[in-house]
Amino acid sequence: MAHESSFSSLAESLQELVDELVARSEAREQRCVDLSELSDAVQEGDLSEEDAQALHELLEERGLELRDDCGRESVEQTSYVNGDLAERTTDALSLFLQEVGRHPLLTAKEEIELAQRIERGDLRAKEQMVISNLRLVVSIARKYQNADMPLLDLIQEGILGLIRASEKFDYRKGFKFSTYATFWIRESIQRAIANRARTIRIPVHIGQRERKIGRAARDLVARLGREPTDEELAAAAELGVREIREAREAARVVTSLDRPVGEEEDTTLGALLPSGERGPEEDVEIALRGEALRNALDRLPEVEREVVKLRYGIDGDDPTPLTEAGRRLGISADRVRQLERRALAELAESRELDALRPAA
């Protein structure tokens, strides 16, 4: 029964996502869903690959076309020219792009033929499908270059998504493979960014919540003309104020103490932070105070000196109770108290200790 309840809950969640995406498409008066919207829905719902595939199929059943330009008046054409892609990249990436450029893009007919062979378990066909679409991975990965992950790492994660797309692609539905693969490439890169781009790793659902809050914040700033309050942000993102604050806390940037700072970057951040250790001046002052105390104690009668040492642990031992001090010295506790009181009165008049008192 529990399994059936869980399955029913999942189906309801997927249907809610579909209804939301359908509503957006109707508001645009276009029968399409943008790939970025679908990727965001998968991330926010923390859907598995199987659930994401089910969501994709539900959208198709509702007659919605999956596109990379849905709702945009002008579409920026993606360039696959090797020279453009290699510009301002590392030598390693340039070599990779040169290798990628050796493999031509596939025609629609070739995609179907390879998909049929992949369905029959042909690994060479799968390899050919992946290699021929590597330029698509590079193009998508470059859009995430500001995500604190090296471009080659982003490409590697995108390739994993491309491989999953080649395994799940259904040529019978009439979609271009590149359109279908774009979704999986983006999903793989976005999940990798959430998992690996931070010095301190945070749970995936926290990263998804951050993105949801970020979108809500941008919308509110555009609408209100100012930064929204936590309460306004919580209402727009359909979250609690506490969740907003937790996400903000998790989003704090972690930096290195060895990071250069200053106009000339001639010092490190760590050098500017206060140290918990004592400085040489404090060590000298402690040594002087100790010497002055020893000189003052030496002026006391021997029994009074021993009482003070025992009672206040001056030799590094723990302070000794009256009874124990009396037992060690062979006198009563009352006598210890009398000697202690007399010794402290004499120390209060000591020139050595008087010099250590702060000026009034």
Image (tube, grey):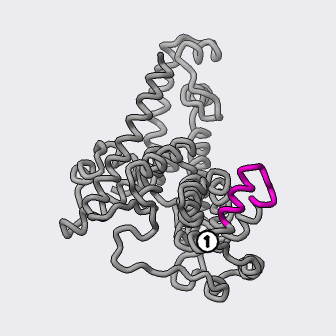
x, y percent for residue 314? 60, 35
Taking the spot 61% from the left edge, 49% from the top edge, the residue there is 291
Q: Three-letter amino acid code at disc 1?
A: Leu
Q: Is residue 345 visible?
A: yes
Q: In screen coordinates, is 149 left or right of 5?
A: right
Q: Specify whether 336 is left or right of 59.
A: right
| Residue found at x 54% / y 60% | 174
Image position, residue 226 (x, y; %) = 21, 67
Magenta segment includes 29? no
In this view of the protein, which residue sits in the foreground, 79 or 227?
79
Relative to residue 220, is residue 311 drawn left or right? right
Q: Which residues are magenta?
A: 111-126
Q: Looking at the image, is 330 positioned above or below residue 357?
A: above
Rendered location of residue 88, percent (x, y):
63, 85
Q: What is the number of callouts on the image?
A: 1
The overriding secondary structure of the stretch rendered in magenta is helix
